[in-house]
Image (spheres, rainbow, N blue to C red):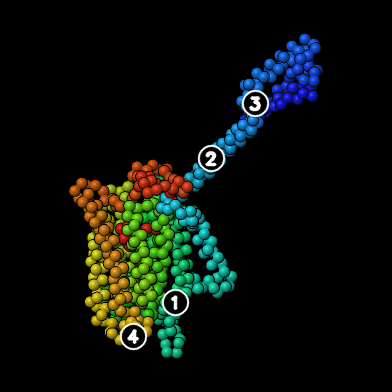
Amino acid sequence: KRQPNSPLAVVEHSHGSSHHHIVSDPASEIADPLEPCASAKTAKAVRSATHRLRSRRRALPSAEGAGDGEALDSRLRSRSSSSSSSSSSSSSSSSTDKKSKRASKKNIIFNTRNPVIIWLANNELHLSLALLAVVHGCYWAGYQWPLLWIQMQHKAPTADNGVTDSHDVRYVRGIHDIKFIAYWIVQIIAMRSLCLHHIMPVVARIISVKGARETRRFSEMAWTLLYITTTWTIGFRVWQSSPYYMNTASFYANYPDDHMRMPYGLKWYYLVQAAFWLSNMYTIHVEERRKDHFEMMTHHAVTIALVLSSYHFHFTRFGHAFMLVMDFPDIFLTCAKMFRYIGSEIMPNIFFAIFTVSWIATKHYLCLKMMISIWTQGPTLVPHEKRFPHYPNSYASYPIASVLWAFLFVLQLVLIYWFVLILKVIQRVLIKGEEANDNRSDNEDEGESEDSSVSPDMASDEKTFASAPSISNKSSSSTLASQ
């Protein structure tokens, strides 16, 4: 900038984030240092100062010419925006690194890009424990509404006077069963998260399970085995004390009068199983993606439909036995996979052989026998006057039975598809001498390093899922897909 009325010629130029001040020779005492002077000495000093000034101005970009101010401002704005974007990218990368570290600590693999599910998965333990603390805290404080969530409701009167016999307490279905199921969904998610991320990783380190992937899968199988063995044992004890133990004809005898009133153990088992399968629709998205993801989703949806519909239509005896039959082989499959992740060579093959035999005996032979009994024993044991809609609380009719049978048929098709995969595993073991590995459940790189993990922000498409772990269910406890 020229200042004609100033004793100094000052040029200010901003370049980047620094300011340059160029000042002419202060010895010149003229009105304008660029105009001729009377004194030759002063004029020489002024020319020298002016030359230095112009040289410095040429070295700095856009210091002269029309519109240089706007060009300089635009250039500075672009540089500042680029610097801010670089700083924001660096900060975002640092935050991504922090999230990646947190994800690596939890050792989780997501199977979805939904931000809500990812947020729930990252906070599932804290949220579930907080909800359980609120319910039990209010109960301990003297409130009565938590009992509708914690305890089973709808006791059935067993005497004509409406008094319930304490020695033979029976329950009927009701609207408050939804609250009991919701309570157990939260409780199952809390137990699963505690087992997968806090208890089983410690056990895996104690027994020398190597690798992040092996630790993660070992924890999943351990949770699966813990749940299946507990619920199957309780369900089997209830089945042993029931009139339909080893008797398919009792599935339909005295329907619906004796079927409406359920003992405590049967109703508890049914509602907890319903809660577990409903929670699986969430947990299937917070575990690593399987190759048969569509078949697993189909299996979960059909199982939920069968459990809820059989409970509503009072076909709980059939559903109880069917769930026990379906869950039994998975005990051996989870044991085989756990021994595989431990590093054993013989035990996985032994348990896989037992699993294969039990799969054929239960999921195909017994299940098909029960499906056939719907059409052979059901119409003969349920008289016409007790069928829908002639008899109250009866849903025995050909249309309803056809819908349930269609669900069972779809489930059997999924089981046949998985059985074909089992045969391929057996072929590899017997012919090629390989280990009995599940060729459809592990959909990530077999050479994953011990500390490999990816944060939830690094979700990618299915190609990424197939090649490496991308981002963080107990799996199905009643089929091969559950593993």
Looking at the picture, which amino acid does disc 1 mark? Gly
Q: Foreground mark, 2 or 1?
A: 2
Q: CA distance from mark 4 to mark 3?
A: 99 Å
Q: CA distance from mark 1 to mark 3?
A: 86 Å
Dot placed on the residue nearer the N-terminal end, 4 or 3: 3
Q: Is residue 325 visible?
A: no
Q: Foreground mark, 1 or 3?
A: 3
Instruction: Give SS at disc 4.
Output: loop
What residue did someone put label 4 on?
390
CB under 8 Å between discs 1 and 3: no
What residue did someone put label 1 on?
174
Whether residue 227 is situated above or below residue 3 in the rendered picture: below
What residue did someone put label 2 on?
89
Dot placed on the residue nearer the N-terminal end, 4 or 2: 2
Q: Residues within 10 Å of mark 3 (few under 14, many from 20)?
A: few
Instruction: Give SS at disc 1.
Output: loop
